[in-house]
Image: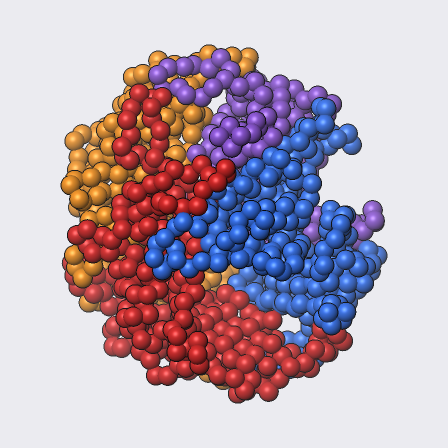
Chain colours: A purple, B orange, C red, D blue
């Protein structure tokens, strides 16, 4: 049980310069007891309202240096304060405020919301177990208008999809990675690096791109890029929900449509998910 | 990988009387191969477009006798037709069309959408494993305006919640149960029976209700009621996301508000989840 | 300016029997002044927070006998209390709680949310003008699986739609009507009557239905039915947003699909809106 | 009547460089006839399916040089092609794809979705009337963490809001402007200029900001800035839906919260709308 979508803004000031971190926190506990379910005995139950208070108090006291550090702070607090807690999990998601700029000059206290990929993290711990930290990005929508195809697939009597070597690849990405034995990482820097890997592996070189023979291969390319360039990432899960773009058939309207007008097919949509781990991580 | 939200309507006619079943299907596969990820070799990949075709063809050929039967049909088809499939999972959700009635007379072909709890089911199978079937209800919003409290809970310096013995209990329910070794069940009848159990266990006797000392106890009461009254259910998971209603303090407006005007607090919201299984099922 | 989505629940008790009315209120004002915009002089500005307080206080004092009466109470309060108010408008929308029944017996304090058409109303008044009241229903989703067609329409080189005399008609209805010079109406009773008219005019007789040659004609039939059967309605606006259902072409899958499997096309969707008034109302 | 959310992507290539414009179009007509409503005679009705075809054909033939030009093209086509059309209105909204950059280098065919304010436009025409064009931006979320207050407002017994001279101002902006007698404007350039005016008027100078005594004054400042700097804008409507941020009272948790931790109040929310026109425009 727990408290979901605890929303708040942490404001930090350095002179006239303001820094904001607006987040949404979900914190869940599993207790060692069962009497609250069986007998309605609440004596060990930490109210979800108290959980909310604790999250706000920790934000006030420690600030939010990084989402990950804040999620770890919360888990540690519950584990060390309440001996009836058997397991704690905390999810933190960021509202994507960016500092406004006027003619290249950063504004001291004005911000704009730019939701081009939402940053989140998760920390969890079992009593007597390690504190595990995950980070991720979601709702990241990308498109490439060529250098994508799908050919040579398995066919039978239910196959009507034609082979294509030049289609639009458009999808919404969800990536979540584990830091394994988490130490003193620069989480902000790593997150930015992972995001760059995703954009690079998805799109290829700026002057020509790189051919994607399938969603599967693109997912794998993203994962391989992250694992090779970001050593702190131990396991990486990627989900690509893709929107297909149909070239409109204009023959009966007397026109030849050479991939100029396309219609997105939002339902049904394809989905491709894969989790990849380092070998040394699997062996451990 | 798979295809999500394959939406369609299956129309069935008996003379002038029409029957509709509109559903949303998600079908996911895991293949035995990895070459599509590693090498971009698609030769074993069943396109998600083919998956969609298969779902529609099965609906056309077999109809949708029950959601559960249809989900099983789909799983069986993939397992028996494609030897490269290692695992298949199918989720089916129903659009809640109800036959219209005029002055008590059922209309032959007119329907109204009544979303008071959405029915869904899931079937999954690993190669050489059993076909497992789940059913469920979601988005079921219930409220009781008394016979609910929360007292005697754990308190420390972060506790500000007062004890209450007469509060509003309002929540959105998600229930999902497993049929264990599934045989020839009357899935429609069981589903209706489970729904009745939920309403009954949530609200208590119509003339006086039954006191709920916590969300945890209410969740448990629902589970116990289902396990005792519906023998086909082996494991039952319940999630209760509750909206708290705050009695508005009107003192500074010169009024005494005796639980007459309350304001819903939609974020943050509490959440309570529990999974309960029959003993014999756990031993098996 | 104003306050939107003021959500609250009004609880009323008669002995052990509880009655709930949960609503969402939006109240907007226009002041006679402009100095708050031009000079930042707020001396006549009624804070939106005060507006919220007033709505809650009126709910506490008067209860919500009907949505319409409550909306009128709010408008009257602002007009009579604040001489700087030039115009006031209040919108009230209901959360569709229905009393639970167990084996036909009504529960004294348990409710279920059944969103099969949302009831709303609006009241507005200009200083020295009449208090005008509107009522309505929205998000009402209806479907008829036959007795609908579309033929004989205008054709040119951009027409590709085939004529059809047996299609599915499925749409979401929005209806809003004006009560003209509003007196002491039984608003609950009228609302129920209008809803029945909509269902009846949409679907036709229960044993055979009634043929709809177009969305336009169905909209008109609904309006004519309401105007003829509900004398208090002076003007009636109807918007029908329709979802088209495509019969899936299964020829290339080796099957004949006789309107058995259909796919909803949710975007783009057609929309048909019409406002109809009584003659005497137009003359007035 | 008409067709809503006609979604499509227009792809344009210059050598290896690709340009995308993904839009959502709504087109509505009013006919000179009434027989389709009264008699079900469809002979003058242009099917909404034909309307969709026309929009796609125009996109194919003319491309989408600017949203505004495209909306005008659609209106002109309906007015000149169909003499039964009495009125036509077209709304076009853009999916905010931005070209990807890698280390400062623009990618030839990869894009990312960045929804920081959605661009839209509208064109409408009555038979024998002028073609009127509007443009706008919506869903633009801005925040300033200081230089905002609300004091000296009207008070009575229902006022509980304290005066504040340092609060957070956070809101979602909707702006829509009219171009009056529209000629050969550079619509892309003007739209960018208006957006800059909004950001500048909302936030003030980057090093210190500018004090906002109310939402009303901020709305007016935005309007005055646009009217003074963008001569083509004749009428400007601005709606500011603001989210209030509550400083969490931590006294009972033993802490002093100096505007460090704040909780957003998303419902109810305040709304402030104002339409301002040039004097010469009003005289015309």
Q: Would you identify the image quadrant in which residue B22 lies?
A: top left
Say which of A184 and D283 sits in front: D283
Query: Residue C184's spot in the image, x, y percent?
Result: 34, 83
Say which of C149 and C4 sits in front: C149
Q: Would you identify the image quadrant in which residue C186 lies?
A: bottom left
Number of callouts: 0
Eyeballing the image, is C236 above or below A258? below
Q: Which quadrant would the C terminus of chain C be assigned to in this image?
A: bottom left
Query: Residue D85's spot in the image, x, y percent?
Result: 52, 54
Please tell me which residue is depicted at 59% across the width and 46% down the height of the picture.
Answer: D77
* C63 left or right of B179 in image: right
* B222 left or right of D269 in image: left
Please tell me which residue is depicted at 44% across the width and 50% down the height of the picture.
Answer: D45
Q: Which quadrant would the N terminus of chain C be assigned to in this image?
A: bottom right
Eyeballing the image, is D159 above or below B276? below
Q: Is residue B242 visible?
A: no
* B61 left or right of A258 in image: left
Eyeballing the image, is C211 above or below D154? above
Query: Residue B84's spot in the image, x, y percent?
Result: 38, 14
Q: Is residue D100 visible?
A: yes
Query: Residue B277's spot in the image, x, y percent?
Result: 27, 38
Say which of B108 and B220 sits in front: B108
Q: Tell which residue pokes out farthest to the front in this image.
A: D83
Please tell me which residue is depicted at 70% across the width and 68% down the height of the picture.
Answer: D276
Eyeballing the image, is C234 above or below C137? below
Please tell me which residue is depicted at 48% across the width and 51% down the height of the picture.
Answer: D2
């Amino acid at each position: 049980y727990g408290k979901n979508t605890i929303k708040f803004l942490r404001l930090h000031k350095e002179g006239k310069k303001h820094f904001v971190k607006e987040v949404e926190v979900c914190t869940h506990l599993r207790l060692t007891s069962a009497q609250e379910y069986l007998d309605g005995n609440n004596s060990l139950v930490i109210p979800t309202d108290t959980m909310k208070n604790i999250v706000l108090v920790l934000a006030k006291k420690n600030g939010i240096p990084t989402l990950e550090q804040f999620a770890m702070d919360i888990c540690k607090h519950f584990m060390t304060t309440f001996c009836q807690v058997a397991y704690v999990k905390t999810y933190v998601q960021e509202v994507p405020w960016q500092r406004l700029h006027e003619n290249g000059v950063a504004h001291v206290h004005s911000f704009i919301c730019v939701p081009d990929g939402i940053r989140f993290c998760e920390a969890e711990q079992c009593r007597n177990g390690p504190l595990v930290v995950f980070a991720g990005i979601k709702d990241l929508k990308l498109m490439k208008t060529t250098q994508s195809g799908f050919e040579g697939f398995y066919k039978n009597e239910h196959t009507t999809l034609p082979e294509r070597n030049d289609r639009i690849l458009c999808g919404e990405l969800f990536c979540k990675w584990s830091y394994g034995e988490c130490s003193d990482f620069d989480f902000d820097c790593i997150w930015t690096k992972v995001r760059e890997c995703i954009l690079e592996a998805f799109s290829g070189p700026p002057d020509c791109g790189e051919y994607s023979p399938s969603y599967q291969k693109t997912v794998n390319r993203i994962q391989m890029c992250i694992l090779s360039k970001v050593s702190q990432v131990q396991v990486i899960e990627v989900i690509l929900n893709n929107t297909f773009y149909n070239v409109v058939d204009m023959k009966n309207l007397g026109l030849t449509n050479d991939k100029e007008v396309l219609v997105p097919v939002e339902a049904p949509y394809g989905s491709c998910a894969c989790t990849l781990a380092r070998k040394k991580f699997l062996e451990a």
